[in-house]
Amino acid sequence: MKIGNKIFENYTYVMAIINLTPDSFWQESRKSADNVLFAVEKAIRDGAAVIDLGAQSTRPGYGEVTADEEISRLEKPLRMIKERFDVPVSVDTYYSKCAAVALETGADMINDVWGLTHDGDMAQIIAWHKASACIMHNAECTLSGDIWHPIIGFLRNSVRIALDSGIESDKIILDGGIGFAKNREQNWELLNGYDKLYTLGYPLLLGASRKSMFGGEPADRLPQTLQSTRLAARKKILFVRVHDVKENAQAIREVYQN
């Protein structure tokens, strides 16, 4: 898979979560223009291959902000990162207006938690900039019954939207959407069967870091997160999107060394 000027294959890479928000559920991931360069430098040093910037929390019960507010939070830190570091940057947004500004500022990928379906212009914006797309499953209501048919159907439709809009096939990665429109039992079913998504023919990204499916408080969920990362590495999932870069990178190395 291509993201920016890098090719990713034959390994499980770490995507570092850096949130430019005041309300993301894991406080340690919250950064601002004042400290974002230190956070990115540390993430790269700890083993991050891609930085994922988010300017809006999508935690349960979050308060939606506008595209303009996302842009105001994102634009300066993104420009600073791209001027300082040679690292691909993903921007987590479902607004095409924010995506356009991000890509013009130097972002390499858009990570859309609505799989290109929330904003009708999103796929065209990504294609116009020859950028990469992370397509995640989501739904208005919690799934019921069999989870695989709606997840795979949604992702297949989103891939069609991407390809019809001109996004290159080697710039697409899929995310099953752990924690989105799924209850705890469904999240575990998705995690344990994540490799079923390979039937769609694209590399996969897993985003399970410190999520509520693991129980307890966010501060106590690192051990379970590392277990999910080891599982991802055994399943040859291309990326894990995580808060704790160093620990997850080490967990991946251990799997590949054995």
Image: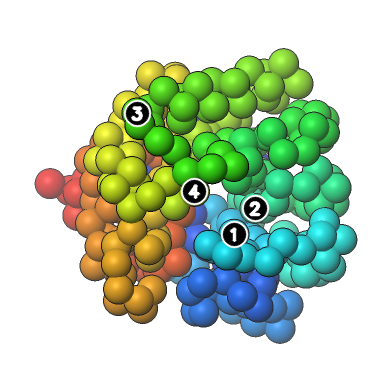
Question: Label 3, label 4: how many angstroms apart (C-alpha)?
Answer: 15 Å
- Residue 180 numbered mark, or none: 4
Question: Label 4, label 1: how many angstroms apart (C-alpha)?
Answer: 9 Å
Locate residue 146, reporting x and y percent: 34, 28
Circle 4 sits in a helix, a strand or a loop, which is it?
loop
In this rendering, is residue 40 above or below 157? below
Residue type at mark 1? Thr
User: Is disc 2 in contact with disc 4, using a CB cutoff of under 8 Å?
Assistant: no
- Label 2 sits on residue: 92
Viewer-side residue, 178 vs 88: 178
Residue type at mark 3? Asp
Q: Nearer the viewer, mark 3 or mark 1?
A: 3
Question: Label 3, label 1: how many angstroms apart (C-alpha)?
Answer: 25 Å
Viewer-side residue, 114 vs 76: 114
User: Is disc 3 in contact with disc 4, using a CB cutoff of under 8 Å?
Assistant: no
In this rendering, is residue 219 above or below 134? below
Q: Earlier along the polypeptide chain: callout 4 or callout 1?
A: 1
Viewer-side residue, 208 vs 130: 208
Locate residue 35, reporting x and y percent: 65, 82
For label 3, count other residues whose C-alpha is less than 10 Å away and answer few (under 14), some (14-19) or many (20+): few
Viewer-side residue, 38 vs 158: 158
| Image quarter of residue 108 | top right
- Label 1 sits on residue: 58
- Label 3 sits on residue: 146
User: Is disc 4 in contact with disc 1, using a CB cutoff of under 8 Å?
Assistant: yes
Q: Earlier along the polypeptide chain: callout 2 or callout 1?
A: 1
For label 2, count other residues whose C-alpha is less than 10 Å away and answer few (under 14), some (14-19) or many (20+): many
